[in-house]
Amino acid sequence: MTTYELLLAPSANRVYADQAPRLVAAEAAVLGGWAVRPHQLASLSCLGFEAERLDGAAIERIGRLSAGLALFEAVPDPAPDAGDDAVLLRPIPGPPPGPVDEDLVTIPKYAGKTNEQFTRLLLNVTLSQVRASGPVTVLDPMCGRGTTLTTAWRLGLDAAGVELEVSQVEAMAAFLKTYLRRKRIKHRAELNPVRREGRSLGKRLDVEAEFGDQLRRLSVFSGDTRQSAALWGRRRFQAVVVDAPYGVVHGSALEPGRGGRRQRSAAELLDEATPVWARQLAPGGALGLSWNSLGLPRRDLVDLLRQSGLGPCQGGPWEEFGHRVDSSIYRDIVVAVKPWESQ
Ligand SMILES: C[S@@+](CC[C@H](N)C(=O)[O-])C[C@H]1O[C@@H](n2cnc3c(N)ncnc32)[C@H](O)[C@@H]1O
């Protein structure tokens, strides 16, 4: 057995940084079955674990962990005065970086942006459960300005989204156009109005970009997530990944059955949206959802997912992703899989 230490990346967000070691430990258990211990080494946050000598594939998987910065192997300290247990840490080269730079995800800063490391974690644990064959496209049906979508690009995947606020889609379009132009990446980006039967339904953004020999695609509709299946038609996705709103949410239209009110709780929205998202999954696909469990208890959401025909992942590390964001938000993650035999 060899002892390894994974040095964790510092997080820009203090609240998240405090919780990251515990969350990445649960992520490591889901992704590789590694039993890791979060601890401090010379005041640096690390995850220590023992394993048979890691091969290239395992090193690559560890390199994909959301908050991993550098991997080290403990080797005996050869100094004559070192004790029997003294070790030195030898760095292990990580996988080469992909063609899409990290700054695609980190440059945009705005209120309501999902923490970048957390987004990576949510994608990682969801993708780990995808059994659908063929290329994976990730749908974020409440995509904001697209942190999930650009993180999916970095993972080598195509991305699709729906976002209620047309201004968010416009801001995403403006950023992507500027970014791709400045980086001299060959691309095509179009933001067009969507009209059906003479009615304006919002906007649609379509982007294609060539990162070396990889072509990445991204498409986003402005609109209500509960209309996501209508917007995307018969298209199915191998992964649906969403960081749901944490508090009161605003509807896109007055709703007659609700006494004309525009607002509903995040729990009501999840109740209505979950069956829609489940329908959009390909058989063998996985849904990964982060939500505020103070507004909707985990067991209720798990029931909702089951009623929508999905199999929620339960027990062990799956129930160790909950963490406090502030006094009114306790964010948690649930991942659920669509069975092969379903349509
Ligand atoms: C927690 S934020 C997600 C932020 C996103 N991950 C990002 O980093 O930009 C939730 C998003 O859901 C959107 N939203 C709220 N209600 C919606 C609805 N009914 N349909 C679609 N999007 C909605 C909000 O506008 C917000 O952008």
Image (cartoon, grey):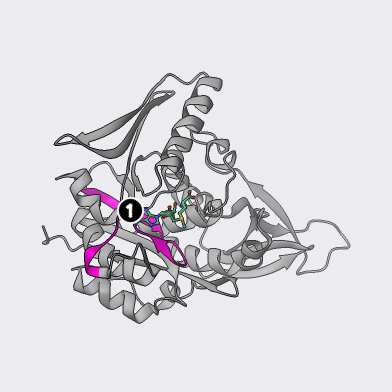
Query: Is the distance from the Cβ of mark 1 to the nearest ligand 1 atom less than 8 Å?
Result: yes
Above or below, 146 relative to 304: above
Q: Amino acid at mark 1?
A: Ser
Q: Residue furthest front?
A: 260
Q: Is residue 226 left or right of residue 316?
A: left
Q: Is residue 49 magenta?
A: no
Q: Is residue 238 magenta?
A: yes
Q: Residue at x 26, y 50 (%)?
A: 238
Q: Which quarter of the image is occupied by the N terminus?
A: bottom right
Q: Is residue 277 visible?
A: yes
Q: Position of residue 111 (x, y in %)?
A: 57, 51
The image quadrant where one finds ligand 1 is bottom left
Which quarter of the picture shows residue 195? top left
Q: Is residue 276 left or right of residue 152?
A: left
- Front residue of this view, candidates 294 and 316: 294
- Front residue of this view, candidates 189 and 57: 189
Q: Is residue 281 visible?
A: no
Q: Residue at x 31, y 47 (%)?
A: 223
Range drawn in magenta:
235-257
Characterize the local packing of mark 1: few (<14), some (14-19) or many (20 or more) Cα atoms within 10 angstroms.
few
Q: Position of residue 229 (x, y in %)?
A: 20, 51
Q: Which quarter of the image is occupied by the C terminus?
A: bottom left
Residue named by callout 1: 252
Q: Position of residue 65 (x, y in %)?
A: 51, 54
Q: How many marks?
A: 1
Above or below, 316 relative to 141: below
Q: Residue at x 23, y 43 (%)?
A: 134
Q: Residue at x 54, y 72 (%)?
A: 323
Q: Is residue 320 left or right of residue 310?
A: right
- Front residue of this view, candidates 73 and 43: 43
Q: Regarding mark 1 in the picture, which secondary structure is present there?
A: loop
Above or below, 54 relative to 218: below
